[in-house]
Amino acid sequence: MNSKTNSVAVDVVYRGDEGFLFLAGGAHGVFDLVDGKRAPTSTSLNSFWSNYKARSAFANSKGYRFRTVIFPEKSVALKHLIPTGENFESIYQRFYKRDLKPRGQREIIYPLSAVQREESFSRTDSHNSAKGYTSIFKEITSGLFPKKTAKAVELIEATYEVCNVSGDLGGKFSPAVSESIPIFIKPPLPIELASNGIVHGNSGVLVLVNSKNSLSNKTLLIFGDSFFRAMLPLLATCYRKIVFCRTPFFHFELVNAVAPDDIFCGIAERYLSRCQLDSSRPHFLSFPYLSGRATKPDPKFAELWSKTIDMEKLLE
């Protein structure tokens, strides 16, 4: 990793052993949470479990396969690289985890053991590496596609290529801190992918994927954040159509129009610092208007929208 720099990153970044950078502060105060110095509010705890129960009940009543994926925090998975991290513990396991019935054990995936290796994370990014995302993919799909996951992983691993990159944490230094690491150089299968193109925004981003050569003909609806967005080309090995919605909420108003086989909700572990009830959500399609952000859809977005979304059911 290129670490020749005379500048110091802003105080939200911690430089650990072996050149690994960690998100320490920021909006969620990550190190205080994983160290137990600060706990999520009772409102956040109650909202998480209330949301899960309602989401699970809805999905099961409609016959959808449902999963909630909590993406482990880098400073928890690799705490052995943080000299001050002896008391670090998973936010989910410390504050949220409960004894779950078999359905809950199946539906809530917290793949910590799958990513407790240095190769599972980029040194310069707060997100997983290509190998880390592949490990999480296996954790998610092995129970849903037991006969197809091995082939999908074979396709995914064939796209690795070592490149020099600088992640979101490395970019906080000047000059940026970079590293050479395997990344995905192309989708494992040919796909059509287009976004609604919210300008300089996150909530309300809508990404549509069509994967004509996928290993199944199933449709997937995702409510999640940047972790699941990064996994869309991987998931397209197993799903014919994917609708990804960048949101912390479960948007019941979209489900009928998408007609999914499976529904995933994803949350970065640090976002457990503050969960909100789904009942407080705006309509998903209103996000850009509420934030005053322009949209610039990708060229194929309209075509994929017409192929993927049932407009009559959207108005129900």
Image: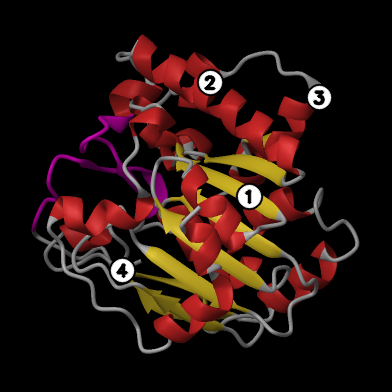
Tags 4 and 3 touching, CB below 8 Å = no
Secondary element under disc 1, as helix, strand or loop, is strand
- Residue at image mark 4: 166
In magenta, the rendered stretch is: 7-30
The answer to whether residue 167 is left or right of residue 9 is right
For marks 1 and 2, give the CA distance: 17 Å
Which of the 4 image quadrants contains residue 302? bottom left
- Residue at image mark 2: 49
* Residue 284 image offset from top left, x and y in percent: 37, 51
Secondary element under disc 4, as helix, strand or loop, is loop
The total of numbered circles placed on residues is 4
Secondary element under disc 2, as helix, strand or loop, is helix
The amino acid type of the residue labelled 1 equals: Ile
Of pointers 1 and 2, the one earlier in the residue sequence: 2
Mark 1 vs mark 4: give the one in front.
1
> For residue 48, which numbered disc appears in the image?
none
* Residue 145 image offset from top left, x and y in percent: 83, 58
The amino acid type of the residue labelled 2 equals: Trp
Of pointers 4 and 3, the one earlier in the residue sequence: 3
Mark 2 vs mark 4: give the one in front.
2
One can see residue 20 in this view: no
Q: Residues within 10 Å of mark 4 (few under 14, many from 20)?
A: many
> For residue 263, which numbered disc appears in the image?
1
For marks 1 and 4, give the CA distance: 32 Å
